[in-house]
Image: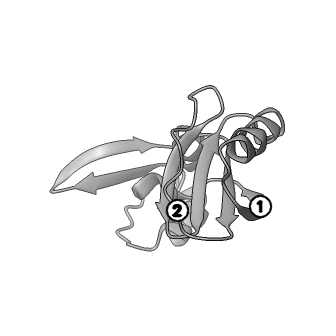
Amino acid sequence: MNEEYDTTIFITTHDMAEADELCDRIAIMDEGKITVSGPPSDLKGSIGDEVISIKLSRSMKLPEIPEEFGVLFHQDNELVQIHTADVETSMPHIINYLADHDVPIASVTTSRPTLDDVFM
């Protein structure tokens, strides 16, 4: 309808995947105020280009990650997520840094940020 009638359509949803698929621009609100808005790709890019997810062999608190490697976004028991602008450059440094600090790594995966990540 948007393209056919050249009109703006407002969608209200809690489903970030739906918003990502259907919307050209998104506004995320908190307590009745817009906290962030823009095209989905810009919003996802604002928190880092990629996410490195590290599964630990046992639950532990990580040492502070140097800023040049990325931003620790989430840690919950054995799962750690780090946002970085350049996964190919950052990942070897992060793995070596964690190994130097005796952090037991079970597996490592990468993914692109989602609107759920932006919302959180």
Label 2 – label 1 distance at C-alpha: 19 Å
Q: Nearer the viewer, residue 71 or 15?
A: 71
Q: Establish if 89 lies above or below 56.
A: above
Q: Residue at x 56, y 65 (%)?
A: 22
Q: Residue at x 56, y 61 (%)?
A: 20
In the image, taking residue 20 as reference, residue 102 lies left or right, namely: right
> Percent from the top left, x then y, of residue 112?
69, 53
Q: Residue at x 60, y 65 (%)?
A: 21
Q: What is the number of the mark on residue 109?
A: 1
Q: Secondary structure at mark 1?
A: strand
Q: Secondary structure at mark 2?
A: loop
Query: Tag 2: residue type?
Result: Met
Is residue 8 visible from the viewing direction of this image?
Answer: no
In the image, taking residue 35 as reference, residue 81 lies left or right, namely: right
Q: What is the number of the mark on residue 60?
A: 2
> Percent from the top left, x then y, of residue 89?
81, 32
Q: Report which quarter residue 114 is drawn in.
A: bottom right
Query: Tag 1: residue type?
Result: Thr
Q: Quadrant of the N terminus?
A: bottom right
Crowding at label 1, few (<14), some or many (≥20) Cα neighbours within 10 Å?
few
> Percent from the top left, x then y, of residue 82?
60, 48
